[in-house]
Image (spheres, rainbow, N blue to C red):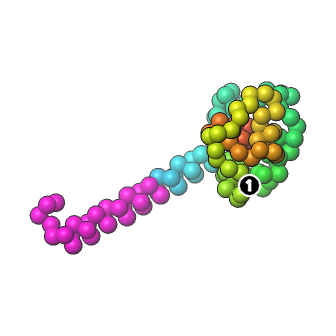
Amino acid sequence: YEWMSDAARQAFEQLMEELREQLMQSYFNQMSEGMQNLTPEQYGRWTDLPEDALDPRIEQIANEWTAGAASDYDKVLAIQRRFHAGGFEYDTDVEIADDADALLTFLTQTKTGFCQQYATAMAVPSFMP
């Protein structure tokens, strides 16, 4: 498109960017609609949590944070909103804990972590009954 004037090239690039954004939004909407309809049976056994392995307070927190969520997908979004609402901080300079209380400590005390803490905090409450 070198034969285009600068104004035409800018208009073309802007149009392409708008189309790209619309396409991505459409794709995201379709993907999220499909995810909302998945059942726990479709997830597979990898989402099962060991019985009695977690502090019961984690389930209480999960139930509080996800109250009113209609699906597991909505639960994930509710947990994500809770992290964005404040009080939690992303920081890679944290003491790594791998004991049974690590998740509870992150959710109730330190509220500071990186991908390991956030991924666990998103996944575990999302798959609680």
| Residue at x-position 87% and y-position 41% | 57
- x and y, in percent, of residue 87 in the image: 74, 55
Question: From the viewer's perspective, is residue 6 above or below residue 60?
Answer: below
Q: Is residue 30 left or right of residue 22?
A: right
Magenta segment main secondary structure: helix
| Residue at x-position 15% and y-position 66% | 4
The kind of residue tagged 1 is: Gly
Q: Is residue 113 left or right of residue 27?
A: right
Which portion, as a residue range, is magenta? 1-26
| Residue closest to the far left | 3
Quadrant of the snapshot with the N terminus:
bottom left
- x and y, in percent, of residue 113 in the image: 68, 42
| Residue at x-position 86% and y-position 28% | 52
The answer to whether any part of residue 44 appears in the image is: yes
Among the 4 quarters of the image, the one containing residue 3:
bottom left
Among the 4 quarters of the image, the one containing residue 49:
top right
Disc 1 marks which residue? 87
Say which of 128 and 41 sits in front: 128
